[in-house]
């Protein structure tokens, strides 16, 4: 199937995106918490990724809309996080207007690139699920949304949330190395910083919202993964289990990295499975680049995400085998993308004095050989029950 475009279609689409961006900017200046949250969500969680996907992937019609939703959101989280990190590395306090300027310039740049690079492309068919499958997807997302968003701001910050919000406050006030004092990756700090600036404070619902949203979209990503690997029935069961699983659900309702990590990991695996599944090398290369980007993003959220690299390498080897070196340009590009994204943060972090303390904490407490393998199942059930 070949999809063609004319100038009127491109102009209409660009006009809609610019209108949404303008409305989002306006909403953030109204002083209304609901409008600010909605405008911030559009600018940070959807529009940049939608444009990036238009650039990387061929434009799809209604048959591909389901895939593009989580991919667009995941890409937006990645791009938004990078914008916040750049602003944080600049001297001085953080404020709303530089963040808006960064996101608006990013959207404008992606629009220009999409116009400049638009051409006819071929793509594989992505079949729209039948009504029964759509009803199943809607049910699963309804369950996931209810458990993640209902009374989301009912309690004050607790546990690790206090550490995150304290460092976010320090970063906003101008402590240039605030993110380096975090023992995990910077993604959760960047996301929380953006929504604290969007809403002008530290409202519990507002700061927890993007993490709950990421977790909800991870459920949809799990549906897509299981649907590609098995069938719609298995996809419904897998996504429903993820929607109600205790640890995932509990941490998705906190200012914590878990929802973002699950989304990034699900999307990286989905992209590499699509890479393994499809025959078109050009389309496979695009999924490879997206998957590499999501893998790097997961590592910006937490180091433990590195374990997903094993199944990703397995899928890549199953696709190309010893022929992987033939397409060295895409391999170099995707590898370079991961290295650049990670080095941009982790090289300064390793050089920071706090890195020694973080490294010792993980090697002596988390992964010390003296701890040895042990049965973690009772602890898993206890924590799951606690967070339900």
Image (cartoon, rainbow, N blue to C red):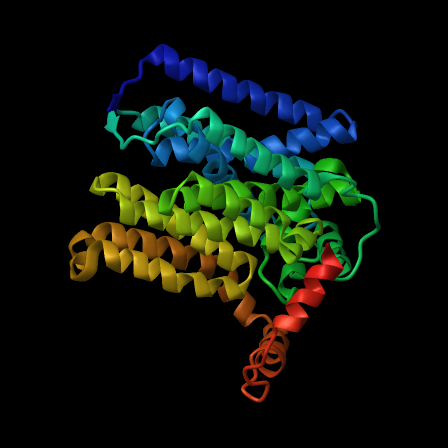
Q: Quadrant of residue 216?
A: top right
User: Residue at (30%, 25%) from the top-left corner?
Assistant: 118
Of the 4 image quadrants, the one containing the C terminus is: bottom right
Number of callouts in the render? 0
Q: Is residue 66 above or below residue 84?
A: above
Q: Is residue 131 above or below residue 144?
A: above
User: Residue at (39%, 49%) from the top-left corner?
Assistant: 291
- x%, y% of residue 307? 45, 65
Q: Quadrant of residue 206?
A: top right
Q: Is residue 263 above or below residue 22?
A: below
- x%, y% of residue 2? 24, 23
- x%, y% of residue 381? 67, 65
- x%, y% of residue 252? 66, 50
Q: Is residue 346 visible?
A: yes
Q: Is residue 69 above or below residue 261?
A: above
User: Residue at (69%, 43%) from the top-left corner?
Assistant: 148
Q: Quadrant of residue 127?
A: top left
Q: Is residue 342 left or right of residue 168?
A: left
Of the 4 image quadrants, the one containing the N terminus is: top left
Front position in the image: 199 or 87:
199
Front position in the image: 190 or 275:
275
User: Residue at (37%, 22%) from the top-left corner?
Assistant: 61
Q: Is residue 283 left or right of residue 44?
A: left
Q: Is residue 101 visible?
A: no
Q: Residue furthest bottom?
A: 370
Q: Residue furthest top?
A: 8
């Amino acid at each position: 199937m070949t999809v063609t475009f004319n100038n009127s279609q491109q102009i209409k689409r660009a006009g809609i995106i610019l209108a949404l961006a303008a409305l989002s900017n306006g909403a953030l200046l109204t002083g209304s918490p609901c409008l600010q949250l909605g405008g911030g969500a559009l600018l940070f969680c959807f529009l940049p990724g939608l444009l990036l996907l238009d650039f990387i992937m061929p434009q799809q019609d209604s048959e591909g809309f389901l895939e593009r939703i989580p991919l667009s959101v995941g890409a937006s989280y990645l791009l938004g996080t990078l914008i916040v990190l750049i602003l944080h590395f600049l001297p001085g306090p953080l404020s709303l207007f530089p963040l808006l300027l960064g996101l608006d310039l990013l959207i404008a740049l992606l629009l220009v690139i999409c116009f400049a690079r638009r051409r006819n492309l071929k793509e594989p068919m992505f079949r729209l699920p039948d009504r029964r499958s759509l009803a199943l997807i809607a049910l699963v997302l309804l369950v996931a949304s209810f458990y993640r968003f209902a009374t989301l701001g009912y309690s004050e910050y607790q546990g690790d949330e206090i550490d995150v919000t304290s460092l976010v406050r320090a970063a906003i006030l101008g402590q240039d190395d605030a993110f380096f004092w975090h023992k995990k990756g910077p993604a959760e700090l960047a996301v929380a910083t953006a929504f604290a600036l969007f809403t002008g404070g530290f409202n519990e619902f507002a700061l927890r919202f993007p993490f709950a949203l990421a977790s909800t979209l991870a459920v949809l990503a799990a549906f897509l993964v299981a649907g590609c690997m098995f069938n719609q029935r298995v996809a419904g069961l897998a996504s429903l289990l993820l929607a109600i699983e205790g640890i995932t659900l509990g941490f998705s309702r906190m200012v914590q990295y878990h929802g973002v990590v699950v989304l990034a990991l699900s999307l990286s695996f989905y992209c590499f499975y699509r890479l393994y599944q499809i025959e078109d090398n050009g389309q496979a290369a695009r999924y490879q680049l997206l998957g590499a980007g999501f893998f790097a993003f997961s590592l910006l959220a937490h180091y433990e995400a590195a374990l997903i690299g094993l199944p990703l390498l397995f899928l890549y080897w199953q696709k190309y085998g010893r022929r992987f070196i033939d397409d060295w340009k895409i391999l170099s590009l995707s590898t370079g993308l991961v290295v650049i994204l990670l080095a941009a943060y982790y090289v300064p972090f390793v050089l920071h004095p706090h890195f020694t303390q973080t490294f010792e904490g993980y090697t002596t407490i988390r992964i010390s050989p003296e701890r040895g393998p042990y049965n973690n199942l009772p602890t898993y059930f206890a924590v799951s029950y606690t967070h339900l």
